[in-house]
Amino acid sequence: MKVCMVTVGHAPRTDLSPDMIGLLGDRYEVTQMGSLDAFSVEDALSSLAPQGDEETTVTRLRDGTMATLSTKLVLPYLRDVIKRAGEDSQAVILMCTGKFQALECPVPLLVPYELMHSIVPVIASGVKIGALFPMEEYAEDMLNGWRNHGLDVVYGCMRPPGTEDDLRDATANMKDIGLLLLDCIGYTAQIRDTASDMLGVPVLHPKTLMARVLDTLANQQ
């Protein structure tokens, strides 16, 4: 099965792809495309910079820079690359847990935000939830996104991939939770396993979730 991993910034995402490919296994032919592949680092930073207090997206550029860009300006390039990726793939996965409007693709498109926000309210309506966010400056908006479902959520912040000590600090207020959400595509399967062992609860990991959905799609072919 041919699968394209789409990133908001530049491809390939050498920080994300090994973990994702490891979860997928060798049954998939994986390619990568980035929304901003046609941009130099300098052009992306200058022409897609946010103005005022508009909504922003954080993504990694090819030189390793973590860039804060205007979501409004990036979105047309993201929509375009998703459509192009679907023309030569049997499924497309978006390597970002951010919320993006009106994404369309000619083949199945796996969007972590939509998957997680569809599943969690159904399976955890009575559960106290812990959520791990990547950056404090986005935490309030991300927390409100979960609480808008009527969920009982506490949170901590840890920049991915994070270490065991980072994880322990970030989850210090989560001793009585029943489910942990890793709400960033940068968190690894290793951190997923460490968190599960440390807290003794199930962990919802976006890359694992997408891999399992893809397995279901692939089994039907």
Image: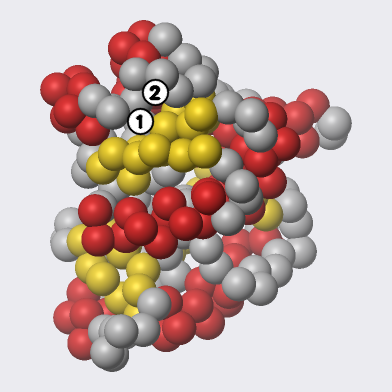
Q: Is residue 143 visible?
A: yes
Q: Where is the C terminus found, in terms of image quarters?
A: top right
Instruction: From this view, report whether residue 216 is shown above or below residue 194.
Output: below
Q: Nearer the viewer, residue 153 or 208?
A: 153
Q: Pointer 1: what residue?
A: 188
Q: Is residue 74 left or right of residue 158?
A: right
Residue pictured at 46% horizontal, 39% vertical = 153
Q: Secondary structure at mark 2?
A: helix
Q: Nearer the viewer, mark 1 or mark 2?
A: 2
Tag 2 residue: 192
Q: Residues within 10 Å of mark 1 (few under 14, many from 20)?
A: many
Q: Quadrant of residue 17?
A: top left
The alpha-carbon separation of the residues under discs 1 and 2 comes to: 6 Å
- In the rendering, at what x and y percent does residue 167 appear? 23, 27
Question: At x 60% / y 72%, what residue is drawn?
Answer: 101
Indicate whether 26 appears above or below 102: above
- Indicate whether 53 appears above or below 184: below
Type of the residue with mark 1:
Thr
